[in-house]
Every structure is written in structure tokens, then in C-alpha cells.
Amino acid sequence: MALPCTKDPTPMRCDSPLPSRTPAMAPLSLSLFLLLAAALSPSPTAARFTCNARARATTCQALISYTPPPNATTTLGDVRALFQLRSHRALLAANALPLSTPQTAPAPSPVRVRLPCLCSAGAGATFQRPTYKVRAGDTLDSVARAVFAGLVTYRDIAAANNVSDPNRVAVGQELWVPLPCSCDPVGGVGVVHLTYVVPAGSSVAGIAEAYGTTEETILALNRMPDAKSLLAGQVLDVPLRACSSAISNTAIDRNLRVPNASYILTANNCIMCGCSSNTWQLDCQPTQGLTSSICPVAKCGDLFLGNTSVTTSLASPCEGTACLYAGYTNTTSFAILTNLTTSSMCDAAGLSPAAQPSHSSASGLGLPTPWRWSELVVGIHIVLLCLGFLHRD
């Protein structure tokens, strides 16, 4: 390659070839190029989720919305390894996938990851996980942007690991990656906080509608002046409504919260609890496939956990009695608690709050839905009663 002719008074001729770059200059030029690229590219603002929860609620289970790299096939096993999840079942539950789904199956995009969240000094961060081992060519910025899809910034990683120079990390160094999260109630109601990276072309109104919350809630929770200030790549705290439950305050899993379009395994995996926006009541059933030698039988008298009996009297044709999950204890021995509850099935059938997006429907999970069967039975009884009155006339 020849140089163009210029009036620059140098001893090099116009047709002289460019001198070859020495090996010693290559790393320096590469470092300068990376620094220039990082300076010119937009840098996301570090997300700091408010977390002022107190006492035993200072830790909770939060959800992280992770988008795998678009040009690579990321499996569920890859996601589990990246976030150091102890259980493959927990990943399936967070994404409403059947328990039979193998680790080799492609991960949905985005994929939800449930991680423990710790509140400290008014802010929340995932507790001890995930960690990342530095590879050759890594920088803190590439770890934040490319590996963890912009859920965190290089400044957050540097501060959490006492790294003075973000451009100099040792190969093999173990880094804690503190993802923002929260345990706080919203409007006095317990929720599940979702850490969400804003895709290009999004709006606050669209995000609020998709996740069953309000535009005002998202703006206030993320301390945004208005909807126009939303940026692509911004990390948002999105509150997900959780199903209400009958879990006792003395139970080990008393802080159990399950958002719509997901389920969770609790009581040593013996109980599967799902949430549906049809009733917003926690629907817990014995986990299929586990033997009675591992899991104790959960009953309310003669009524098994998750089952409902419907009253057929003329006085209260809509009254139903359900055996609900009330948590588990392990003080002296492992025990599953239940609670017999009577409620109006007609009122329950009338609830239909806005649903949140999911990767698969609740019915596709094979999860039992006793409330829907009960509603059908109630309807049949009402029709029969009406026919009886007509026959008398």
C-alpha cells in the first residue's frame, strides 16, 4: 500500500510502502482502539434499585430478564451455568416450562432467572451470584455488555470487586457481578421485582401494559422525570404482581411470592405452586413424580391439597371449600401445612386482571387448575336449579 503524495516534509517518498507494524506495537494499538470505541459508544447509566426492606425481608427472590446473544444458540444449560443456578428445575419454573424440558433445549429470549436479592444501604444487588472468571481478551466493559447483556455496568463490577483500573483485569480473576434488584413492596403490596433491559423502540406505556403495571409506577420506581427520558439499554425495575396465598407466617417459605405465568417448587420440591391472572390466587399442588416416602401427604381432612369441594345447596350454590397450601416446617420433622378455606366461587370467577407476557400458557405446563373445574361445576348446578324452578312453575 503506497502513501498519497503530500507536502508533508518527511523523508518518506510518496510511493514508499507503509512500514510494517512491529509485534510490540500491536497490543498498544489494540488497547487504544478499545478505549476509543468505549469512549465513542453510549455508556448506560448504572442502575441502582431502591431497596429499603427491613428485618427478615432484607433478602428475597428477584427475577432477572436476560437476553442471550442473538447470533448464538444459547441452551438452558448455558444460562444455568452463567448464573450459577443450583437447580435446573428452578430455571424451568421461572419461565413456565414443563419439568420434562432438558438442559439442552434452547433458552427462550428473554429468559427469566430467579436469584436471591440482598438489600443493603438502601439499594439491592443479587447476593453472591453470579460470578465470572475473566478470560483472555476480556475487559470489565465487555463482561458487562456482552456477557451479561447490559444488566450491569463496568463501574458496578469494578466497585464490587475493588478494581482500581477497569481496563486491567487478570485472566482467571474471579469477579462478582452485582445485578440490580429489589425486595421492596410497591404501594404497600408485596411484588416480585423484575430487572429488565429496555429494547430499542420501547415505550414506558408499552412496558407497563405488557407487565401488568402502570406507567406512573415505572416512572416513580425508577426515578424518571417523564416517559420521554426512557433510553434503549436502560435497566428498569419492573414490579410484577404476585398471587396471594394462605401461607402461614411461621412457615419456612412465608415470603414465597410467585408472579403470573410462572410457578415455583417449594417444600423440598414436594409442592408446585403456580400463579394465574384468572384468579390471582396461588394454586399449589403436590409435585408429580415424587414418591410418598420423600414427600408427606398433604390433606385437609379428607380433602387433598389443591382440591375443591362445591356446595350444592339452594342457600349457597356458589360456595366452595378448598384445601390450600399453608407452607412447610422442619423444626422437629418435615411437615407440609394446609388450610381449609371457604370462599364464593362466583366472585372468584369474576376476576380477570391483565395478564403479563409469558413464554407458554399455564395450561401447557400440565399444571392442575381446580378453580376452573369448580367454576364449571358451579355453572352446571346453577343451570339445574333454574330448570328445577321452571319445572315447579
Image (tube, rainbow, N blue to C red):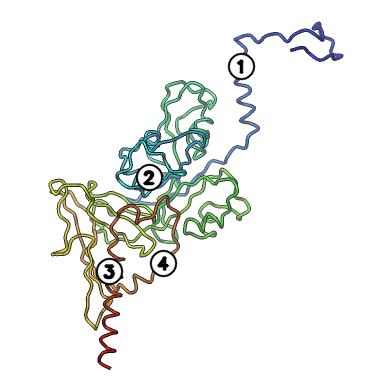
Cα distance between the residues tagged 1 and 4: 61 Å
Can residue 282 be seen at all in this image of the molecule? yes
Number of marks:
4
Image: 25 above or below 176: above
In the picture as drawn, the residue positioned furthest to the top comes out as 11
Q: Quadrant of residue 363?
A: bottom left
Front residue (pair 112, 189):
112
Disc on the earlier residue, 1 or 3? 1
Residue bearing mark 2: 114
Please name whichever residue, 37 or 122, is drawn nearer the observer in this view of the structure: 37
Q: In the image, what residue type sits under mark 4?
A: Ser
Label ID, residue 352: 4
Label 2 – label 3 distance at C-alpha: 32 Å
Question: What percent of the width, then of the height, locates residue 173?
Answer: 43, 24
User: Is 143 left or right of 296, judged from the image as shown?
Assistant: right
Q: Is residue 357 above or below residue 38?
A: below
User: Earlier along the polypeptide chain: callout 1 or callout 4?
Assistant: 1
Under mark 1, the amino acid is: Leu
Mark found first going from the N terminus, 3 or 4: 4
In front: mark 2 or mark 4?
A: 4
- Per the image, the residue denoted by label 1 is 28
Indicate the amino acid at tag 2.
Arg
Indicate the quadrant containing the C terminus: top left, top right, bottom left or bottom right.
bottom left
Quadrant of the rendered image containing residue 239: bottom left
Labelled disc at residue 374: 3
Pointer 3 local density, CA inside 10 Å: few below 14, some 14–19, many at least 20: many
Residue lying at 63% horizontally and 34% vertically, measured from the top left = 41
